[in-house]
Image (cartoon, rainbow, N blue to C red):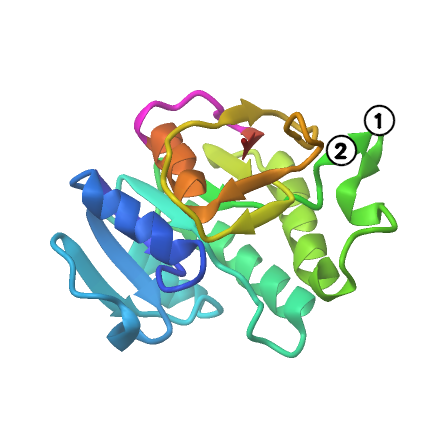
Amino acid sequence: MKIALIGATGFIGSQLLQEAVQRGHQVTALVQHPEKVPALPGVHAQAIDVLDTAALTQALRGHELVISAFSGHAQADVLGYFLQGFQSILSAAKAAAAPRLLVVGGAGSLEVAPGVNLLDSPQFPAEWKASAEGARQALSLLRAEAELDWTLLSPAAMLAPGERTGNFRLGGDQLLTDAQGQSRISVADYAVAMLDEMERPAHRRQRFSVAY
């Protein structure tokens, strides 16, 4: 499959890139700094500013699927930059007639009680609130989207480096926890779940979640 991967050198994006290459897909890695993209078979690195909607539209044309691993973590205004960039991604995907859009979501918008998001709970880390709010608003934008065939995958509360096991559970809008009450997933297994969804769509126009 010919994939456009936005944010291919980030924490999650780099793992999505590795997983896609391992599965034999062709990837256009759309990043600010193409020199940071590893030399891998089937990977073409291209410099892009996601805020340049016209340039992004051109970059997305001709791909069978777009994956957005875009984040604003490196910016001073994390929330503002992310929302501006995400709106540009949506506009570009529509203008490029992208057949499908997969989006890296956050855990903050998952429910820990009926009508209560993890982001709004007292224990949610303050340093992640801006990015979590951005991901929550991105989900709202997607749910209001009439044109795009989208899917958003929310990770467990703890997303960390770790082994690729291929053994995990999928859920919906509620935070998944294990027998010890922990909510966790490795970034490698998150990538497996995302690429599984890409190859075998089961959550069109939905958010789903993954955890051990």
Magenta stretch bounds: 199-205
Q: Indicate the position of residue 109 as horizontal and vertical percent values.
A: 71, 42
Q: Which residue is mark 1?
A: 114
Q: Indicate the position of residue 120 as horizontal and vertical percent values.
A: 84, 47
Q: Main secondary structure of the magenta part?
A: loop
Asked whether residue 155 is in view, the answer is no
Most foreground residue, 4 or 121: 121
Gap between marks 2 and 1, in whole Å? Answer: 6 Å
Crowding at mark 2 (Cα within 10 Å: few <14, some 14-19, many 20+): some
Asked whether residue 112 is in view, the answer is yes
Question: Where 153 falls versus 67 (above or below)?
Answer: above
Q: Which mark is residue 201?
A: none
Tell me which residue sits at (61%, 47%) in the image.
158
Tell me which residue sits at (39%, 47%) in the image.
67
Label 1 sits on a secondary structure element that is loop
Image quarter in which the N terminus is found: top left
Tell me which residue sits at (40%, 61%) in the image.
7
Question: Where 202 falls versus 138 (above or below)?
Answer: above
In this view, which residue lies farthest toward the left? 41
In this view, which residue lies farthest toward the right? 122
Magenta span includes 200:
yes
Tell me which residue sits at (49%, 69%) in the image.
51
Residue 107, image quadrant:
top right
Q: Which residue is mark 2?
A: 111
Most foreground residue, 184 or 6: 184
- Please state if 178 lies on the left or on the right of 19 as rendered: right
In this view, which residue lies farthest toward the top? 202
Say what amino acid the circle numbered 2 marks.
Glu
Q: Indicate the position of residue 123 as horizontal and vertical percent values.
A: 83, 51
Label 2 sits on a secondary structure element that is strand
Say what amino acid the circle numbered 1 marks.
Pro
